[in-house]
Image (cartoon, rainbow, N blue to C red):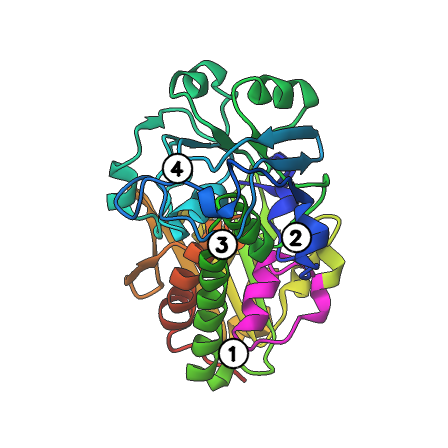
Amino acid sequence: MHSSTLRRGRRWRLAPAVALTALLALTGCASTDDGPAAAKSSGPQGPVPAAEGTTTYPLKLTTWAGETTLPKRPERIAVIGMSPNADALQALQVTPVYALTDEPRVGWRDAAWVKKIEKVDEATRKDPINFEGIAAVKPDLIVALGAIFEKPEFKKLADIAPVLDAPKNEELPWQEVQRLVGKTLDLGAAADKAVTTAEQALADAAKAHPQFAGKTITIANDYGANGGLSYYTVAGSITEGVMTKLGFTPNPNAKKFVDEDVVPDENLSLLDADLLVVTYSSEAVRKAREAKPLFKALKPVTEGRYIALTLVENDPTKLTTADGKQVENAVWMLRMGASPASLTWGAKVLSEQWLAGAKLS
């Protein structure tokens, strides 16, 4: 999907870490009935793992759109919005009672986990919020980070159950999304572990591939005639953050695409890097791009430092390399889907599949 069509996509960038206390804006109110020691759960075999006993209820949830209060530890959780919201629950082994159909399909989704969800709505993040469907499952918490666009929508959700969203109308780092969900569910330690695991996976991949260190990389996605060529390794983006964690150094050209990521034909020279990776929506789009004289003249292309990956027509979770080998499709993770679940999976996909055999100058 082109960046101009993303709804509140700004939240899912790899922003610098901010102090947890400043981001969460969660205020616990002491209670003789619902303090940490009294928190209930369905146990390890139920929808919510056993409570850690560090979050106090009632818990005030302060969001950009208003406040709601969580009276006790939730057990029936609805989740809407982009895949990182569902990822945050999957990483905590929390099974929601309501979730949306993944769109696009993602390779890191745990199929066994999905089967346990009480209601998987046929709607996706692109569709209007199904207030009636959410209300029907009687949730006691709605995880909706980045899913609410207007205050009236927030109020309608809050009339169903307390709503968890970001405290301010601004980007949240993926680490803090996970920690925010974890603290709210009294699973803060589990959330920290999930974040650490993902960060370690990236560090391990960087260590295993020292050839990445200090090199520049450009990753772009060609949507064809309608969407154009989109520069993914924009300064401050998820993609740049992931690639620097793998050892690459930021590309100086990345700053030129902060306001507009489309690369017009006359500016194709800005794709230059030690390694150029372009993902294509179809074989026809790839052939059209590679036929352009300005593209063929790029140094990464002429010097064999160019990797082409094309979407498999009948399987959106796979890409095909130039030599016909299928690899996992990590485009959505790089664009909007950074999370502990996706990054732990994606560290190997990028380093061992996408960049396998990459020729670095």
Question: In the image, is residue 194 part of the stretch drawn in magenta?
Answer: no
Q: Is residue 233 above or below residue 263?
A: below
Q: Say which element carries label 1.
A: loop
Range drawn in magenta:
233-254
How crowded pointer 4 is (Cα within 10 Å; few <14, some 14-19, many 20+) is rated as some
CA gap, disc 2 to disc 3? 27 Å
- For label 4, the residue is 102
The amino acid marked with disc number 2 is Val
Q: Which is nearer the N-term, disc 2 or disc 1?
A: 2
Closer to viewer: mark 2 or mark 1:
2
Image location of residue 181, percent across then percent down: 52, 46
Q: Residues within 10 Å of mark 1 (few under 14, many from 20)?
A: few
Q: Provide the residue designation for mark 2.
A: 263
In the picture of the structure, the residue carrying the numbered disc 1 is: 303
Quarter of the image for the C terminus: give it: bottom right
Q: Are marks 1 and 3 in contact (CB under 8 Å)?
A: no
